[in-house]
Amino acid sequence: MIHTFLRPSEWKYLQHKHIRVMDTNGVKQLVLSVSNAKTKKASGSIDSTSTEVAADLYVNKILKRNDDPNAHVFFADIKKRDKATVDKVSRLFG
């Protein structure tokens, strides 16, 4: 999450279909289409670009666990995403 620059309100709804891997001269980055961006001023989504570290972790670890385009990237097992995901992360860092 740190290397994507997303806010908690943005990553809790992030699905694999919102992510594409961009390779520019051998440097991989993730392009995240955030549909619920807090700073959004127009309709549609905002694209956010990650660091190379995030792309490596996503491709080599996260995507290998679950590559269903409709699956949530973080805490895919949680169905009620509004409060439950925030509570779970708060306990991890609390």
Image (tube, helix red, strand yellow):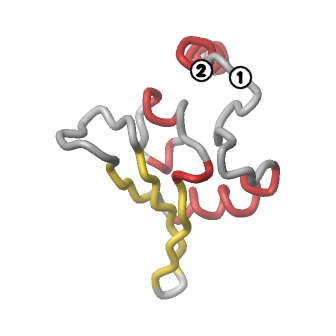
Find residue 28 and report its horizontal and vertical position in percent. Answer: 54, 73
Q: State the image coordinates of residue 16 (x, y, percent, origin top left).
A: 62, 50
Q: Residue furthest right?
A: 65
Q: Is residue 48 left or right of residue 19?
A: left
Mark 2 residue crowding within 10 angstroms, few (<14) / some (14–19) / many (20+): some
Q: Is residue 15 left or right of residue 68?
A: left
Q: Amino acid at mark 1?
A: Ile
Query: In this image, 57 relative to 49: left or right?
Result: right
Query: Which of these two is toward me, 87 or 43?
Result: 43
The residue at the point 72 percent across, 33 percent down is 76
**At which x and y percent is residue 65?**
82, 49
In percent of width and height, residue 18 lies at: 52, 52
The answer for how far apart the CA atoms under marks 2 and 1 are is: 6 Å
Secondary element at tag 2: helix
Mark 1 nearby-residue class (10 Å; few <14, some 14–19, many ≥20): few
What residue do we see at 69% from left, 62% from top? 59
Residue plotted at (30% across, 32% down): 38
Q: Quadrant of the C terminus?
A: top right
Tell me the amino acid under the disc marked 2: Arg
* Residue with the mark numbered 2: 81
Query: How many circles with numbers are drawn on the protein?
Result: 2
Residue drawn at x 36%, y 55% is: 47
Say if mark 2 contacts mark 1, CB within 8 Å.
yes
Is 25 rendered above or below residue 67? Answer: below
Q: Which mark is residue 1?
A: none
Q: Which residue is mark 1?
A: 78
Report the side of 2 relative to 60 (left or right).
left
Q: Quadrant of residue 90?
A: top right
